[in-house]
Image (tube, grey):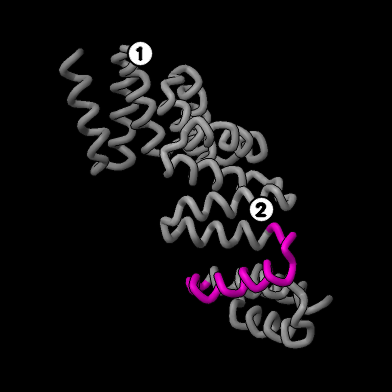
Amino acid sequence: MDKNQQGIQYMQEGKWEEAAKIFMEAIDENPEDAVSYINFGNVLSAVGDGERALKFFLKAIELDENAGVAYYSVGNLLFEKEQFDEAKNMFEQAMQKGIDHGDNYFMLGISLMQLEQGKLALPYLQRATELNPQDAEAAFQYGLCLAQLELIDEAIKQLQQCIELDEEHADAHYNLGVAYGFKEDVQKALAHFNRALVIQPDHMLAGYGKKMIEKQA
C-alpha cells in the first residue's frame, strides 16, 4: 500500500493527524504529484482549515490542470464562503475535466440557484437526482427549483420523493404545504404544514402557512 492509499485509510478511520503526516511525507517524496496535495487538502477541509486546504487544492491544479477533483474541492470551499459565482465556475470546470458524479452536479445546481438562475440550475439538479436517487437533499433542491419555476406538479413529485427518503425533512413538508396551497388543496396543505411543525416546532414559515390556510378552511 502506497502512502496515499494508507493516508486515505487513516481518513476513513478518522485518524486525521496520521493521515496528514503520511500525505505530507508523500508530498515531500514526490512534490510534483497532484494527488498528494488533493489528499492533504481533504484532511485540512475535514478538520475545518479551509484556508490552508484551498492552497493545497490550487497547488494540485497548478501541477495538473486536469485534476477535476481539485476543482470540485475548491468549488465547495468557495460555496461555503458564499462566493457562489466563483464556486459555480469551479464546478463547471470540474465537469469539463471529467467529473461526472452527482455531488458535482448538485453543487453546480445549488450555486446557480443562489445566483437566482433557476432555469440554468434545473438540468444539473435533475442529473444529480438521477445519479444519486437515494439523496433526499438532491430531491428537495430539485423540487424547490421546480417550484420556483412554477412547475408545481413536477415539484410535488420531487418533494414527495424527498420525504419518502427522509420523513423528517421539515422544509420539504413546508414546501409541499405551499405547493398544495397553490393548488387550493387545503387539507393536504394543512397536513404538511402540521407535519413540518411537529418535526420543527419553531418553523416560522410553516406556522405562518398554517395560519393562512386555516383562514381559508
Name the outermost residue toward the left: 215
Name the amino acid, label 2. Ala
Image-quadrant location for residue 41: bottom right
Q: Earlier in the sequence, mark 1 or mark 2?
A: 2
Residue 164 appears in the rendering:
no
Q: Nearer the viewer, residue 140 or 149?
A: 149
Magenta part of the chain: 47-68
Residue drawn at the location 51% of the way across and 73% of the way down: 47
Question: Does 139 appear above or below 93?
Answer: above
Instruction: Give the image location of residue 54, x and y in percent.
Output: 55, 70
Q: Quadrant of the C terminus?
A: top left
Question: Does 14 appear above or below 22?
Answer: above
Residue 23 appears in the rendering:
yes
Q: Residues within 10 Å of mark 2 (few under 14, many from 20)?
A: many
- Residue 91 included in the magenta stretch of the image: no
> Where does label 1 land, which residue?
183
Residue drawn at the location 40% of the way across and 28% of the way down: 148
The residues tagged by marks 1 and 2 sit, at their Cα atoms, a distance apart of 39 Å
Tally the numbered discs.
2
Q: Nearer the viewer, residue 156 or 87?
A: 87
> Where does label 2 land, which residue?
94
